[in-house]
Image (cartoon, helix red, strand yellow):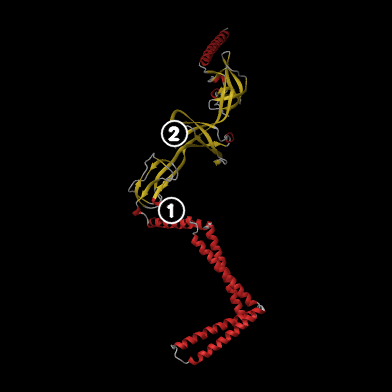
Amino acid sequence: MKKVIIILIVLGLIAAGWFAFSRFRARQRAAAISDLQTVPVERGDLVAGVGATGTVRANQTAILNWQTSGSVSQVYPEAGAQVSNAEILAELEETSLPQNVIMAGAELANAQTALKDLMKPASQLSLRQAEQAITKAEQTVRDLERYVTNLSSPGGQTDIDSARATVVLAENKLEQARQNFEPYANKPEDNLIRATLQNALARAQKEYDAAAQRLNNLLGTANALDLAAAKADLALAQAQLEDAQEQHEKLLQGPEADDIQAAEARVAAAQATVNQKHITAPFAGTITEVQAKPGDQVVPGIGAFRLDDLSRLLVDVEVSEVDINQIDVGQDVLLTFDAILGKEYQGKVKQVALVGNAVQGVVDFIVTVELTDPDKDVKPGMTAAVNIATKQLQDVLLVPNRAVRIKDGQRVVYILRDGVPTAVDVTLGASSESYSEILDGDLKVGDQIVLNPPLEFEQGGPPPFVGR
């Protein structure tokens, strides 16, 4: 009997404990349900995107250094100044420059003068002189051609007869001159009559030799040495004629491209040396850093200025190879900055790298984004959070990303049905940072989605949402 009483007591205690525990669990469950956060299922527009971070940079940046040694005499712009392309920013004292830089000024002037003279059109005087040289050379060639022809072949009978007669007359004249000179041959050389007769004898001898040579030429009796010499003279005359013609053609056509290029290179080399005495802006932009001060002693490589083209602000971001094929030039971009609270900026994709960079087995592609509405708050060097809009959907069923859980390997959301959170399997489509598209699932507009389902409704607790 005692055993029965003890068993009944134990059973009563167990029943009471179970009842108390059930009441506690019910109250705990009711409290958990009362603390649920819910939002209704809605239809709306969704902008799906790819997120990344990057650093703002200027459209173009240049670090300007001194190219020679010297003492700084003038520094013109201050930090923040706007400068134009090729504007002089600072100069060195002329007397402090190396000798080669100082002398380059004279070399530049000479080179510019030479180039200017080279580009001048030919004057009428030089053209006429070139034409006269051609005419003279042509006449010389014709005379020598005729002479070589005479040496190479016998002449006509009429010319031979005329030449013979000329030889006879010249021979007679030579004999007469010899006879006239003989009586005075032993007279002193300063004797006037002797000198006159001797001169007449020499002229007669020259005329006879020329007549005899012409007759020999007509008879074809020129020796090989004379013929070779005549041909050499003809070749030289023809070469001189070609040179005269080429010179005339150059005057008409102007300087050759190679000559112009050489003259321009000489000017450029001298100009480059002269430019070492000052620093100029390579493009229009804003002076963002000034290191040079008047009186500074500088050497090549010492920094002077930093110049940035702030007309366009760009952000280079790294996008994973998984997402890169979703990115195209022209896509809209949303940018936010940790340094600028409460503001969002718009941008456009300007460039997508064609080749990826592999780092420790991870391949990323550089995507360049341009801000389309920058203001004074955005500065190069700032870190930007970038969201590239890859797809824009309209009137789709949406669910908050924070409401998605994973249960038994399947994505689910919890909705309130009869006041109880109930898991519903879902298939997600495109996603943004806050919402995802519902492609499939037993959901309809107005269903109350639980954002914070109690742990007891989840298998193994609330796993984090896994984005697409």
Q: Image quarter for residue 146?
A: bottom right
In this rendering, the answer to whether 148 lies above or below 88 is below
Name the image quarter holding residue 305. top left
* Coordinates of residue 342 in the picture (x, y in percent): 45, 27
Using the image, determine if residue 168 lies above or below residue 326: below
* Visible residue check, residue 221: no
Q: Which of label 1 and label 2 is nearer to you?
A: 1
Q: Nearer the viewer, residue 85 or 453?
A: 85
In the picture, residue 188 is in which quadrant? bottom left
| Helix, strand or loop under label 1 | helix
Residue annotated with mark 2: 378
What is the three-letter code of the residue carrying label 2?
Val
Residue 230 visible in the current orientation: yes
- Percent x, y for residue 441? 62, 21
Q: Is residue 207 left or right of residue 373?
A: right
**Residue 55's spot in the image, x, y percent?**
47, 36
Viewer-side residue, 211 vs 457: 211
Q: Position of residue 72 (x, y in %)?
A: 35, 49
Q: Amino acid at mark 1?
A: Gln
Report the front residue among 108 and 369. 108
Q: Quadrant of the N terminus?
A: top right
Query: Marks 1/2: CA distance?
Result: 39 Å
- For disc 2, the neighbor class at 10 Å (few under 14, some 14 to 19, many from 20) is some
Residue reaching furthest to the left: 295
Lateral position of residue 116 relative to residue 40, left or right: left
User: Residue at (44%, 45%) from the top-left corner?
Assistant: 282
Q: Residue extending furthest right? A: 157
Q: Nearer the viewer, residue 59 or 343?
A: 59
Mark closer to the chain start, 1 or 2: 1
Which residue position holds label 1? Answer: 271
Q: Residue furthest top?
A: 1
User: Is residue 16 placed above or below 86 in the rendered structure?
Assistant: above
